[in-house]
Image (cartoon, helix red, strand yellow):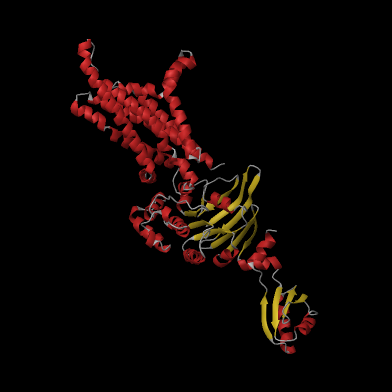
Amino acid sequence: MGPVLTIAKRDITAFFASPKGAALFWFFLMMIGLFFHSFISTYVELEQQAPAMGGQAPTLEQLLRALVYNSHFILVLLIPGFTMAAFAEEKRAQTIRMLQTAPITPFQIVLGKFLASAGLIGMILLASAVYPGFLIKFGNPDVGLVLTSYLGLFLLMCSQVSFGLWVSSMTSNQFMAFIFTLFGLLLLMILNWIAPNITGGGVLETVTKYIASTEHLDVFLKGVVSVKSVAYFLCFIATFLFFTNVVLDSQRWR
Amino acid sequence: MIEVNGLTKTWGQIHALNEVSFKVEKGQIVGFLGANGAGKTTTMDILCGCIGADAGSAKVAGYDITEEPLEAKRRLGYLPDVPPLHLDMIVEEYIEYAARLRKVPRTELKKRIDYSLDQLNLGDVRKRLVGNLSKGYRQRVALAQAIVHDPDVLVLDEPTEGLDPNQIVQIRELIRSLAGRHTIILSSHILSEVQNTCDHIIIIHKGRVVSQGTYEQLAASMQGGNVYRLRVARNADKLAGEVRPLNGVQNVVTGSDPTELEVTINGEPDAVLDQLAAKIVSGGFGLRELALKTKSLEEVFFQLTK
């Protein structure tokens, strides 16, 4: 476990040592802040109008769901930024030689890289928890729902990180890693919506929907931690970490 | 300590290595000499487990690099041709990172970091960013990361590349001082460097080992070890005439300098040399110098890689 943590620690330090770290954190928190502000305004407006118009006032849970959905969308744009350097940069700068000649297995390298990115995602989510924090302080949302939403978001982001690492391991060009990760993640996100169109219903549609990432986030946003969805994320992570391992291992034979 | 057997590697149509075999004994410094593209870096990459060979095996400290990579790599320090530096780290941090990756025990960590920084005179820059250092310093930092875990075997790919003459001398001295403790294999295309630093030389050309041995052996093997340079005080021409008919003397050439002769001997050199010396003394030619003519490594190298 020692070398895994060493690799993770170095990557996290390097992330914050470069302007990239500040830029990604700043961008995310700024966007979420803007969304939060706009949702709160709408929420207050609707709450005041609802009795006069004879409708139901919006709930804090609805506000929370909108917030997490938007976090998810912004993060999909940012995840490639977190993972693009993982292997591509090491290969470009030839520092990968240090990892290759150290007495560690390729899987330890992959795990170290994954822990680094997952740790950063954990930090950025923790920083964004200030907004649900406001809700809890000034309102009374279901705290359990806040926690499951964040757990779902974190698992989803980890699965996307593992995909990003796989793409990064196949190139020595950060920009290529960024673009292809983004492309793949967007595809996974919209798979849910386009499933009926591309499959024509039936079992195929169910399968396609199961592969789509947002389908599983919805479950967490309803306050449910289901085995099916947790298993989906864990399998997804394991699969792509395994793929990354295969890529690293096979590069020795080319 | 290092045992390489029949390494073969092809990149598509290009045969990078062809049946490369050699052995390095413990504590030796071995020079790996070859022109650009001869296969030096490829051999070293395979030896360190960065790439795989198509055929053949490489053993480091008794452990096969593909069968037991972790054990082999634990005993291996590698300085690749492109220094593997993280430019965004502080020198000290970077060396610590290297030490932790190589599983240096926690209790020895500080001692080992100080030792390797000390060995390379990096004390002044230990708090500076690697990216802000000059090329010579960077090369030394890269060398420090290779020795930080006290490896049995050091593999150095062109360690003095891009350094100024003072630094080259420093690095050479350092490499020699490391020799007893570590077994070192270093590659270079600079002949004088190899001649000065190494006990043993392996010459590689177009992916094949064309010759190996000590510098003296290589030089001797190139000319059969039978040309002697003779310098006398006077009458060199007359001496040439007297030496020529001696039994065992194949050829005598007068050199550009009128006092010099080159005597080629075919046969037992000791007996012929005795006769030769007696001739000179009795004839009163005034012997000044009699020595085995050595070729410079350049000549040997050009002859082998023609």
Viewer-nearest residue: B29 or A164: A164
Expressed as whole percent of the image width and height from the top left, the position of residue B32 reads 58, 58
On the question of residue A225 being in view, the answer is no
- Please identify the quarter of the rendering in which residue A189 is found: top left
Expressed as whole percent of the image width and height from the top left, the position of residue A19 reads 37, 43
On the question of residue A112 being in view, the answer is yes
Q: Residue at x 48, y 38 (%)?
A: A175
Expressed as whole percent of the image width and height from the top left, the position of residue B250 reads 78, 74
Compared to A45, does A136 lie above or below? below
How many discs mark residues in the rendered view? 0
Compared to A83, does A214 lie above or below? above
Compared to B238, does B33 lie above or below? above
Residue A110 relative to residue B32: left or right = left
Expressed as whole percent of the image width and height from the top left, the position of residue A3 reads 39, 46
Residue B247 relative to residue A81: left or right = right
Q: Residue furthest top?
A: A54
Viewer-nearest residue: A97 or B140: B140
Q: Quadrant of the C terminus of chain B?
A: bottom right
